[in-house]
């Protein structure tokens, strides 16, 4: 697990600053609000250490947009210190110097930031490339996330990529919205909400802790074929909601390493988990695989594990 703690500048054991640090790069670019925020959160000394660090640096305008979006925040001083610290750490990847070419070459994926979630787990950052532009924690039509607008500002202890939006710590719902491979899951959540008056998206954005098994788009398409229907809207909303709830464990942030073999209670009923094979057996005796490369997608209120088949509740 990655951990990130601010350092006291008076600590005699603090390493000597690098010749040109990621902080220097931000200051030289006249990102005065970011510099002020780092100072207030006591993170300057930390980012002057050896690293390496990959820093996504919001512009002054990006910070102003954040303040404008919250009626309670007129300046950095209005943001609770712990909140500000976690927001800033959500822009830092520790121990890696990642150029934009690496992100573009991968196309999409997850990195781990210095921000902390439940049980001190570090938050995941989703990236994908849209028309050659690296996009971070975006995906919905109403929230495109942050774009890297100036990549590869090099420092001796890492690299800085300039972005046009402040990245707030993502919830489990945010992670589903950000990843296009989970777009049908989001559609299902919205469909259930609008048809029966519930608000599952809001529920999965709350401060409660959730473990969510997130079916891929292909998993939903396979389900439609299995049920002999052509669209989610051919299924009544109450049934869709019951299906979705069978994918959610509440009051627990169960990482892949913490999964145990046995019966597990979800909001929609019991499922059987085999921790050794990373499989789930639902109440209809259908086997579902947890995708090994897409586990432990950590949000601020829980963790997401992607599955290759939709889990069905008891009939």
Image (spheres, rainbow, N blue to C red):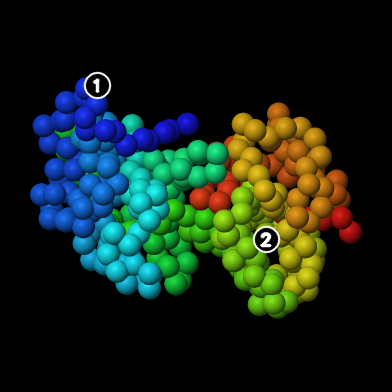
Q: Which residue is mark 2?
A: 221
Q: Quadrant of the C terminus?
A: bottom right
Residue at point 66%, 77% (across, down): 194
Residue 228's label in the rendered image is: none
Q: Quadrant of residue 263?
A: top right
Residue at point 15%, 45% (across, down): 25
Residue 11 horizontal/vertical position (percent): 24, 26
How far apart marks 2 and 1 lie (CA) works out to 56 Å
Q: Is residue 145 left or right of residue 261?
A: left
The residue lying toward the viewer, choosing from 86 and 139, is 86
User: What secondary structure is found at the residue carrying circle 1?
Assistant: loop
Q: Is residue 122 above or below residue 188?
A: above
Within 10 Å of disc 1 (Cα), the crowding (few <14, some 14-19, many 20+) is few
Residue 236 in view, yes or no: yes
Residue at point 45%, 62% (across, down): 139
The residue lying toward the viewer, choosing from 311 and 198, is 198
Residue 213 horizontal/vertical position (percent): 66, 49
Q: Is residue 123 above or below residue 65?
A: above
Residue at point 68%, 35% (across, down): 259
Q: Quadrant of residue 142?
A: bottom left
Within 10 Å of disc 2 (Cα), the crowding (few <14, some 14-19, many 20+) is some
User: What secondary structure is found at the residue carrying circle 2?
Assistant: helix
Q: Is residue 283 left or right of residue 42?
A: right
Q: Which residue is mark 1?
A: 13
Residue 3 horizontal/vertical position (percent): 41, 33
Residue 136 horizontal/vertical position (percent): 38, 55
């Amino acid at each position: 697990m990655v951990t990130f703690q601010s350092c006291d500048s008076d600590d005699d054991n603090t390493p000597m600053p690098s010749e040109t640090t990621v902080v220097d790069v931000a200051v030289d670019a006249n990102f005065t609000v970011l510099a002020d925020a780092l100072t207030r959160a006591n993170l300057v000394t930390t980012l002057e250490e050896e690293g390496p660090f990959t820093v996504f640096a919001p512009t002054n305008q990006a910070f102003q947009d954040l303040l404008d979006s919250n009626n309670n925040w007129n300046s950095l001083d209005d943001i609770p210190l712990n909140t500000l610290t976690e927001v800033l750490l959500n822009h830092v990847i520790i121990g890696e110097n990642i150029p934009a070419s690496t992100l573009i070459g991968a196309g999409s994926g997850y990195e781990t930031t210095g921000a902390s979630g439940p049980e001190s787990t570090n938050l995941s950052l989703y990236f994908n490339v849209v028309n050659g532009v690296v996009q971070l924690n975006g995906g919905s039509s109403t929230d495109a996330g942050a774009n890297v607008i100036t990549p590869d500002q090099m420092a001796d202890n890492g690299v800085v990529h300039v972005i046009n939006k402040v990245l707030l710590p993502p919830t489990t719902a945010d992670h589903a919205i950000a990843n296009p491979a989970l777009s049908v899951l989001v559609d299902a959540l919205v469909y259930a909400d609008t048809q029966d008056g519930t608000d599952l998206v809001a529920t999965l954005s709350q401060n409660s802790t959730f473990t969510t098994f997130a079916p891929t788009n292909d998993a939903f398409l396979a389900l439609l074929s299995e049920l002999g229907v052509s669209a989610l809207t051919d299924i009544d909303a109450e049934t869709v909601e019951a299906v979705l709830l069978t994918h959610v464990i509440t009051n627990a942030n169960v990482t892949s390493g913490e999964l145990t073999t046995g019966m597990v209670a979800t909001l929609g009923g019991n499922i059987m988990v085999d921790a050794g094979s990373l499989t789930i057996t639902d109440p209809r005796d259908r086997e579902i695989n947890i995708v090994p490369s897409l586990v432990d997608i950590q949000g601020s209120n829980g963790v997401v594990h992607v599955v290759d088949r939709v889990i069905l509740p008891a009939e």
